Amino acid sequence: MSSETLSSANSKDRAYPLEYTRNIGIAAHIDAGKTTTTERIIFYAGVVHKIGEVHDGTAVTDWMEQERERGITITSAAISCNWTDKKGPFAGIEHQVNIIDTPGHVDFTAEVERSLRVLDGAVAVFTSVEGVQPQSETVWRQMDKYHVPRLAFINKMDRTGADFLGAIESMRTKLGVKNAHALFLPIGSEENFNGLVDLVEENAILYDDSDSSMGANFEYAEIPAEQKDQAMEHREALVAAVADFDDNVAMKYLEGEEVSPDELKLGIRKATLSLDFCGVIPGSAFKNKGVQPLLDAVINYLPCPLDLPPMKAFDEDQNETSVEPDDSSKVAGLAFKLWTDPYVGKLVFFRNYQGTLRKGSSLYNPRTRKTERVSRLMVMKADSREDIECAYSGDICAIIGAKNIVTGDTLCDRDLELTLEPPTFPEPVISMSIEPKTKADQEKMSIGLQRLSEEDPTFQVTTNQETGQTIISGMGELHLEIIRDRLFREFKVEADAGRPQIAYRETIRGASEGEGKFIRQTGGRGQYGHCLIKLEPNETGEGVELEDKIVGGVIPREYIKPTFSGITEASQNGVIAGYPVIDFKVSLYDGSFHEVDSSEMAFKMAGIFAFKDAMAKAQPVLLEPIMKVEVSTPEEYQGDLMGDLNRRRGQIQGVETKANLCMITALVPLESMFGYSTDMRSMSKGRANYSMEPSHFDTVPTSLVENIVKASPRSAPARS
C-alpha cells in the first residue's frame, strides 16, 4: 500500500489516520545524545512544559532510579507526541509520532533489538566528533536486520572538534552507506554553531543564542553568502542521488530543470523507504538546535505503517501468510516487551499490526493455545499511563490483564491462528552466582528472578546441580549489576553475588589395585565385606566402565551389584578436591565373604574403600573445563586480543579473515574467561564480539591445583 492516498480500510473513529502515524525509534552508541534528543522532541511537541536533562536526572524517558543515578538508558521507553510540519507534502497536517528511546550500552542491546522489530522507522544519532562509534555499528546492523528505514542525526555540533562532513564520511566508510547525504548543512561549528542551511527548501534557519532563548527560537533567512556555493554543490549531489530512486526527479535532473522542494521531498521519501539512502541532519540537542527540522524530516521521510511491506506470518500448518494494516480485519499483533509496573501490575507492550483491539476483548496466544483477556488498554508516556478504549492497526499500546505471555508471543483473533516472526536475542555472555543472605530472602529472590527473566530475554536463571548455586547470566557485568540492584529495590532482596563455582573433574593417569574391607562386630550379627579391584584409565570421553571378573564364587552374585554401587558412589567424590571422577575402568577380580555377617551394605562400603585406595595410587589429576572460544574483531585489534587469549592460558587454534573482520578460534580454560567480556570490549572499543561453548576437560596446571583444592566443596562449609 502507499500513503499517498487515504486507505478506505481505516476506521473513521481513529484520531490519526495511518498515513499520519509514525512509529520511530531513537538509537545510537552510548552517550551520543539519544535521550537528550528525545527530551527536546517531546518538549517542542508540547508533551512536557519543561525540558528534562539526563545529567540532572530529570529526563522523562529515563524514569528508572538506576537510569537517573547513572545517567544512562537501561530500558527502552515509549512516548507519544503530535507534530505538524509547516511546509511540504504534509504541510498543516498534524501527525501522531510514537517514539521509543532505546539504550546505547551494549549490555542492553536486547532492548534495541525488540524495539526495532516493531518500529517502522528510526533515527540513528551520531556525535559530530567521533562519528560512527562501535555500538553505532551494532545498532545499524540491527536496523538492517529488520529492514528499518532511517535518518541520521549528527548531534553535538557545538562540541570542540565537530566535523559534520567527516561524520557523514565515517557513515560511508564504516557502515557502508554510500548514499548518506546531507539534507541540511551546519552554519558554523563548535561554539559558533548557530544555524542550518536547508538544502531542500534552499533557505537558512538561524537560531537565537540569547540566554533567554538558549537556541529554542529561530527564524528563516537567506543562505549566508559565504555558504551559497557549498550549499549548491551539496544540493546537486543530493538531487543526483535521489534521481536514482524517483523517475520524476531523474527526468528533471537529466534535462537540467529545477527540482522543486516538494518534488525533492517526495523523492527523498522514496529513497529512504528503499533502505539504500539515508538523509543526514546536523544539530545540537542540548543547545536546542536542529530538533524541529529533525521532526519535520521524520514526518516527511520516514514511513507510516501503510508504506511498509505486509508483515510475514505463518499459519498453523507453517504456510506463509501476511498481515496488513487494516482496522476492519481481525486483530493480530506482537507482544514485544514485558514490564512489571508497581501500580497496575504486569504490562505487555503490544504492536497491533492488524484490526482494532478493544478493551475487554480476548486475544488468542498460538504458543500456549490459550485465550488472554484484555482488561485495560493504555498508551505509555514513559512512566505515566493513559487509558484508551481501543488500539487501531499500526498502534503501539500496553495491555493489562494478560497472564501467560513471553516476549515475542503473537496475540491474535482465535479464528486467525497465525504466528508472527518474533525478535531474536543474543545468548548471555557472562554469569555469576547469587545467594540470598537469609532464608527469608530465598523465596523473595526466586519470585524476583522469575519476573526479571520474564521481562528480559537476555537474562537467564539456572541452578548448578552439582554446587547448588543459583547462577544468573546476562549480557555484561553492568547488566547483572542492574539486576542485583533491581532485586534489592523492587523486591527487597538482600543477596550476595560472586563468581560461580566451576565444575571441575578428576581422573587418573596410571593403573593400580585397591583393597576394601568393611568389618564391624557389634555383639550380635556383624558386618563383613571384602573386595579387590583393578583401576585403570579409560579413553577420554568414554566414561566409566565396570567389569565383573569374579570366578569361583569368592563374592556371591547378590553382592556384586552393591560393590559396584559403592565404587560408583565413591567416584562422585575424588581424592584430590572432592570433584567427580571421569573416564576410568574398574575390574572386580577377588574378595571374600562371611556366610553370616556379609550384607549388601557391607559390600557397598567395601567398594567405596577399595576405590579410594586404588585411586590414591593411580596418579590422580584434576581436570578443568576447556571452552572453544570464537572472537570476531576488526583486524586492527587482532594482535591485542590474541595476546590477551594467550595470557588467559588459551591456545589459538586458527585465524581467518573475512572482509575487514578477523575470526580468532581458541581453546581457553573456563576459569580464565571470567571478566573476558568487559576486557574484550575495552581492548576493541566495543567492536569485537565473542561466543564460547564447552569443548573438553584438560589437566589443571600443578601451580593452580592448591588454590582450587582450598576452594573446593570438600573445603567449603557444609550447606544447610
Image (cartoon, helix red, strand yellow):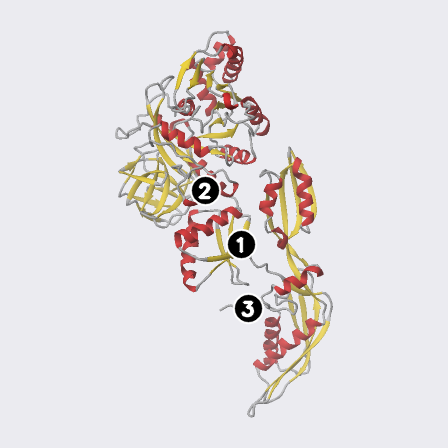
Q: CA distance from mark 3 to mark 2?
A: 38 Å
Q: Amino acid at mark 3?
A: Pro
Give the label on residue 717, or none. 3
Give the label on residue 432, or none. 1
570 w.r.t. 625: above or below: below
Q: Indicate which disc, 3 or 2, sits on the residue closer to the N terminus.
A: 2
- Would you identify the image quadrant in which residue 509 lies? bottom right
Q: Is residue 417 visible?
A: no
Q: Amino acid at mark 1?
A: Met
Q: Amino acid at mark 2?
A: Ile
Q: Are marks 2 and 1 in contact (CB under 8 Å)?
A: no
Give the farthest residue toward the top: 256
The residue lying toward the viewer, choosing from 531 and 616, is 616
Secondary structure found at label 2: loop
Residue 163, percent from left and from top: 55, 23
Give the label on residue 116, or none. none
594 w.r.t. 153: above or below: below
Q: Residues within 10 Å of mark 3 (few under 14, many from 20)?
A: few
Q: CA distance from mark 1 to mark 3?
A: 20 Å
The residue lying toward the viewer, choosing from 87 and 588, is 87
Query: In the rendered image, which residue does mark 2 sit on?
Result: 74
Q: Is residue 250 visible?
A: yes
